[in-house]
């Protein structure tokens, strides 16, 4: 029996494309501009392989032209255009991508930037327009043609007049309703915003006539509206520029332009990777935490671009929680996008990028710590707490990554020190890394429990953040040295004169028993202490949990 072909129910398919693929209708412009860019790329490629065609960069551009009187929006390009057959097959068949075929036929793989692949982007125009016309003249044809469609009831193709090679698409915007306003796509301001957002780094100029109020020539206070053709996009993205051409100021400007933060960045990282997954990234370590950083409202993530086109504004998968303060963007040509190009089909490439980025961030933080201590402390004051949460979270899984980035206040140095510095200074007879917990440095200084340790000449780390001790419990040890609270029962210090204290214990047996009774169930035991010098009494914890930790745990909501 002969095989039957599936009949695609084109109308339904088109409705689906129009109504259910994209989450924001403004992306129609991204799709049309991407197609225009692909069309120019194709001429560029042909010029490389055909001596009869020259490519003079200046004559290739994309133009956006809104007209409020006719309520139309035009997107035109000087790209390769389409023949009648191509119009038929590319715009008459849903899910047919001429660009995808072009890539395959020409075996373009490495470093080629053609964006199209699914053959549906064009129809996004029907999200905002109820009629679309495409007038086009191909590089390979003497005649121009006009394709016209009102959406699901089909299309017509007829001969047309067009002098130059290229394509001109006209969208007849839908009528406004109470809920939907389409006029915004005729506003210079909105169009500029959308172009900047999604298509800023398209490699060909995207032009638009812009009205500007200017001082009238020859006058000092008279203004007039001047219409000027401007290039809206930035063309070459900063991350594709040579690092040696860029100054610190360029990176700060990019940070500000992108509104990654309202502060200035402490450091930037410019990454170009040519490995199994190719990507470029510009990352920033901010100077201060956003007001909502330590709340649930804060959303981590990096901007994700595919071939210079924005795919996701906040891709959370690119950053672990403990580095959630990092801002910036990643651009990769190796992502497998889903059909809406707003998500990825699978996250294998993302995972590789995330791992890679993660290592670089850690390395950069260690660099700052080593070379620029003052700035590191600024950073740590803003984000140190997050690093400590990172050590604590996931059962201490990330401690290896994070332990060398931690700082604690030192009793000896009277400033923040690293664990590495602490351990490297430890006298030979010191067994543990000692810490004391309290609300403030001042209060800890006055703790009776610190006396014996300090008297021995040992350094004590002061834990003033609630999270500190929890994080340390996850670390358990650093360079094989265990952590020990100064208020724990056994300090591991050779406590002299046990005979004398035994005697004292005996002498005061009745007194202790009486004290214990009076304190009732508030204490477990009353003993002679060997660790006190100038204080008469102190509290000691028996088990693993210190008094301070107990306080925090008790204060937690159930
Ligand atoms: P995709 O871009 O994923 O291929 P589209 O639906 O956006 O899918 O476009 C379908 C096809 O129509 C493209 O692959 C291309 O061959 C053709 N096309 C669309 N716009 C243009 C244009 N401005 N110039 C030339 N060809 C175009
Ligand atoms: Mg497309």
Image (cartoon, rainbow, N blue to C red):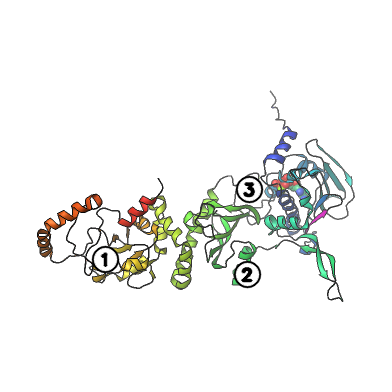
Please name the residue shown 52% across and 57% down the image. Answer: 293
State the CA–CA distance, disc 3 to disc 1. 60 Å
- Which residue was labeled with disc 2? 250
Tell me if residue 161 comes above or below residue 20 in the rendering. Answer: below
Q: Quadrant of residue 282?
A: bottom right
Residue 94 spot, x, y in % from top left: 73, 39
Judged left or right of residue 400, residue 157 is: right
Q: Position of residue 449 (x, y in %)?
A: 26, 64
| Residue at horizontal 59 percent and vertical 50 percent from the top | 335
Q: Which residues are magenta?
A: 61-69
Q: Is residue 414 left or right of residue 275?
A: left
CB at disc 2 and ligand 2 closer than 8 Å: no
Frontmost residue, 378 versus 84: 378
On screen, residue 464 versus residue 100, left or right, reads: left
* Residue 208 shown in magenta: no
Quickly name the residue at label 3: 342
| Element on which disc 3 rests | loop
Q: Position of residue 341 (x, y in %)?
A: 65, 47
- Secondary structure at badge 1 equals helix
* Residue 98 shows in the view: no
Q: Quadrant of residue 504?
A: bottom left
Which sits earlier in the primary sequence, circle 2 or circle 1? 2
For label 1, the residue is: 448
Residue in front for this viewpoint, 506 or 380: 506
For label 3, the crowd category at 10 Å Cα-Cα, with few meaning under 14, some 14 to 19 and many 20 or more, is some
Q: Marks 3/2: CA distance?
A: 29 Å
Tell me if mark 2 has few (under 14), some (14-19) or many (20+) residues whose alpha carbon lies within 10 angstroms of its own. few
Name the front one of labels 3 and 1.
1
* Residue 12 quadrant: top right
Labels 3 and 2: the sequence-earlier one: 2
Seen at 57% across and 68% down, the residue is 264
Find residue 107 and report its horizontal and vertical position in percent. 66, 51
């Amino acid at each position: 029996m002969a095989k039957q072909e599936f009949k695609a129910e084109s109308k339904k398919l088109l409705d689906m494309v129009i109504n259910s693929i994209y989450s924001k209708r403004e992306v129609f412009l991204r799709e049309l501009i991407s197609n225009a860019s692909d069309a120019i790329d194709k001429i560029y490629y042909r010029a490389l392989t055909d001596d009869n065609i020259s490519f003079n960069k200046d004559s290739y551009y994309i133009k956006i032209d809104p007209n409020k009187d006719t309520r139309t929006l035009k997107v035109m390009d000087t790209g390769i255009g389409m023949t009648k057959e191509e119009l038929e097959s590319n715009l008459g068949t849903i899910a047919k991508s001429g660009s995808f075929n072009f890539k395959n036929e020409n075996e373009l793989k490495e470093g080629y930037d053609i964006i199209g692949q699914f053959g549906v982007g064009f129809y996004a125009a029907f999200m905002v327009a109820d009629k679309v016309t495409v007038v086009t003249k191909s590089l390979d044809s003497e005649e121009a043609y006009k394709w016209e469609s009102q959406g699901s009831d089909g299309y017509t193709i007829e001969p047309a007049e067009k002098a130059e090679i290229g394509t001109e698409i006209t969208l007849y915007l839908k009528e406004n309703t109470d809920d939907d306003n389409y006029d915004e796509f005729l506003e210079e301001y909105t169009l500029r915003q959308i172009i900047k957002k999604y298509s800023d780094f398209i490699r060909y100029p995207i032009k638009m006539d812009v009205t500007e109020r200017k001082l009238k020539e020859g006058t000092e206070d008279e203004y007039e509206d001047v219409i000027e053709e401007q290039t809206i996009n930035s063309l070459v993205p900063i991350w594709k520029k040579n690092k040696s051409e860029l100054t610190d100021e360029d990176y700060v400007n990019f940070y500000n332009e992108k509104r990654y933060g309202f502060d200035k960045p402490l450091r930037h990282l410019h990454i170009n990777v040519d490995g199994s997954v190719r990507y470029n990234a510009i990352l920033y370590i901010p100077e201060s935490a956003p007001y909502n950083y330590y709340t649930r409202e804060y959303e981590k993530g990096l901007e994700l671009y595919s071939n210079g086109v924005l795919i996701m504004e906040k891709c959370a998968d690119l950053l672990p929680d403990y580095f959630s303060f990092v801002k910036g963007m990643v651009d990769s040509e190796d992502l497998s996008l889903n059909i809406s190009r707003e998500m990825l089909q699978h996250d294998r490439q993302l995972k590789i990028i995330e791992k890679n980025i993660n290592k670089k961030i850690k390395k950069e933080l260690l660099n700052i710590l080593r070379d620029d201590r003052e700035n590191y402390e600024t950073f740590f004051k803003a984000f140190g707490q997050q690093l400590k949460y990172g050590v604590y979270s996931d059962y201490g899984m990330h401690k290896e990554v994070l332990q060398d980035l931690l700082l604690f206040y030192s009793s000896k140095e009277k400033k923040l020190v690293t664990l590495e510095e602490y351990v490297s200074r430890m006298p030979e007879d010191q067994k543990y890394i000692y810490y004391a917990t309290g609300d403030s440095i001042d209060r800890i200084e006055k703790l009776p429990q610190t006396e014996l340790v300090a008297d021995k000449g040992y350094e004590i780390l002061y834990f003033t953040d609630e999270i500190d001790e929890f994080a340390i419990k996850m670390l358990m040890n650093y360079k094989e040295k265990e952590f020990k609270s100064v208020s724990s029962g056994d300090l591991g210090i050779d406590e002299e004169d046990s005979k004398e204290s035994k005697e004292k214990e005996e002498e005061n047996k009745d007194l202790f028993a009486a004290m214990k009774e009076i304190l009732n169930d508030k204490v477990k035991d009353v003993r002679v202490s060997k660790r006190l010098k100038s204080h008469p009494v102190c509290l000691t914890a028996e088990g693993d949990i210190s008094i301070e930790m107990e306080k925090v745990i008790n204060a937690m909501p159930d």
